[in-house]
Amino acid sequence: MTVWDILLIIVSCLLIVIIILQESKEDASSAFTGEKSELFANKKQRGIELWISWVTTGLSIAFFTFAIIAAFIVERLN
């Protein structure tokens, strides 16, 4: 395993954890009744929600970058 593989595993685990921490946008009761509530549809993210959103975006970019590096660049170096 190379350093890129280890970084990819670490970023993958962090991405899974941060996605699990995110709040669901849908209400569970609307799944059973079939109705769609528009009351909070345009609610802006604040505080921890905004921070989690930024971290998720950063980790996603890092994941794809490390995946491309591990797939193409490292294979050609060997």
Image: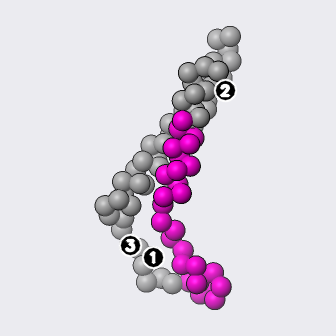
Q: Nearer the viewer, residue 77 or 52?
A: 52
Q: Amino acid at mark 2?
A: Ala
Q: Which residues are magenta?
A: 10-36
In this figure, which residue is indicated by the disc labeled 3? 43
- Quadrant position of residue 66: top right
Between the C-alphas of marks 3 and 2, the distance is 39 Å
The label number, if any, that marks residue 6 in the structure image: none
Residue 59 image point, x, y percent: 48, 42
Q: Is residue 33 left or right of residue 37?
A: right
The residue at 31%/61% (across/down) is 47
- Callout 1: SS: loop
The quarter in which the N terminus is drawn is top right
- Quadrant position of residue 42: bottom left
In this figure, which residue is indicated by the disc labeled 2? 71
Q: Amino acid at mark 1?
A: Ala
The residue at 36%/68% (across/down) is 44
Q: Amino acid at mark 3?
A: Lys
Residue 10 image point, x, y percent: 54, 35
